[in-house]
Image: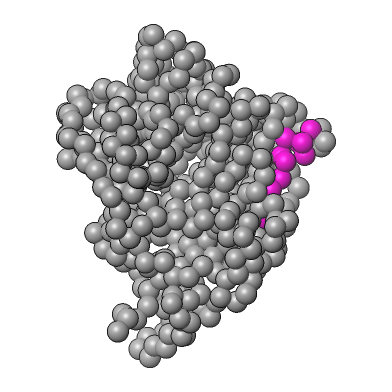
Amino acid sequence: MKKIVCLVADAVVLFVCLIALATVTHSQAVKPLLAKRTAPPPKMAPLTDQHIALLFAGQGSADRIILTLNNNRAGSLTVTPTLYRLSGDAVKLPAINLKQSESRLIELGDSLRKSGVEGQFGYMDLKYSGRLMELGAQLTLYPVTEKGGLDSPRSLAVDFISTERAAVAWLPDESETVVALSNVSSQVITVRLPNESDGAQVVIGPHETILRTHRFEREAKEVVAFDVNYDGPIDAIRVFGYVKNWKSGSFPLRFSDPAASPSALLTAVGLRTSAPTHIALQNISDKPIEYHLHFAEIGTDKPKTLDAPPTRLRPHTGETVSITSPLRQLLAMGVERATLTLKTDADSRSFVAAATQEVQNALLEDVPFRTGNPRIFMRGAYPLRWTQDYTNHPMVANVSNTPMIVRAYAIAGGVTYAFPLQDIAPDTTAVFDVDQIRANQTPDINGKVIPLDAQFGKFHWAPWFARRRP
């Protein structure tokens, strides 16, 4: 399964930052910004213990598991990992020391086997002393080894404001779903699963993980929805899963807290217009909702667009949404990739959605639906890989009504590569073709190139707030 970095940025200016960065240009060199201080500069947040949970969903030492770590700090960073088995038993692992801006890929399954750590795992806690978002981390799992991997992204306490989790997925033929419920707290939690036929409840002990596996035949069901709720701390239960298919590989079940969504817009970035595409949508509210689909070409300042007619969805109902006709129309218009925005008259906690595309050799590719970034996440650092089935075309979509400017750079092979400042108009998606830049050895404004022998790195982006141009 090919991996493509897709990002969504809300362009509303939420904070102001004066930055002087000599390595970035926009048509010409950017001069340092000078501002008369009228008040003392804001104090940096104090260093505190930060925790990141990485969810294994039952994968273990016998499986291939890749751990990716990105140090986003302007200095070294020490990470203390603790691995929790399904039973909740803890395994302390050696500390990992990361240099300034270092990216590291670890074949975790191999390392655990060599260290004599066996069994199936629920989650890993990564602890460091610092500030939020200074460490980036994710797992890549391989439930069907020969069909490529799927990413299990980091889980933070700030991702949640309620005790509800929800997900929906399209099911290929003869599929199996695996859902892992991990209790990262020290309390015993009772979890309710109203979507299961018996309205099941499960009791999960401290740091324990419960696996729920279901096998489906397509004749019986084409969309599967999951709803999880419980009483307890809002960040106690972390949920992750995947759809497993021996013919076409696996793709993740992306659980979220619907109440934490900052926008009623859901956006899937970079859909291939030539690929069979399956959209799964679930109304998790008590009222009918009306939605419509908006498509916009990527990689251009004046995108070709297309809108589908509005559709209504009954309460507590899931369905597959056919977009074959609009994708064919876009392809006929010369559009190879498009950003899909799902717009609705309901609030953000009323629905969840998922997109799956069938790419070459019958492999399945998950294209996540995302909301515009909230204030705390209005920037990002994402892994780059030049191994196996990965392609690196970071995309930043502006789903707001406000133009934005993004500065971006890549770090790989000890080199920091600066992209020109990028204007992103409303309803447009910028593409940073890191692979082509590396392959062509295209220099940045400082004459630097991304080394051909670099196997991994990271891509950074952030809003750029500068003086209005004359």
Q: Is residue 221 left or right of residue 96?
A: left
User: Which residue occupies 51% across, 45% down?
Assistant: 4
**What is the tally of numbered marks visible in this picture?**
0
Which x, y percent locates residue 420? 48, 70
Task: Name the image quarter holding the N terminus.
Answer: top right
Is residue 188 shown to the viewer in this render? no
Of residues 331 and 41, which is closer to you in this image? Answer: 331
Tell me if residue 300 comes above or below residue 107 in the rendering. Answer: below
Q: Where is residue 325 in the image (x, y as percent from the top left)?
A: 28, 31
The answer to whether 63 appears left or right of 330 in the picture is: right
Residue 187 x, y percent position in the rendering: 51, 34
379 part of magenta stretch: no
Image-quadrant location for residue 55: top right
> Would residue 441 be seen by someone viewing this image from the given angle?
yes
Dividing the picture into quadrants, the one containing residue 336 is top left
Pick the front one: 391 or 234: 391
Residue range (magenta): 103-113
Question: Is residue 105 rendered magenta in the image?
Answer: yes
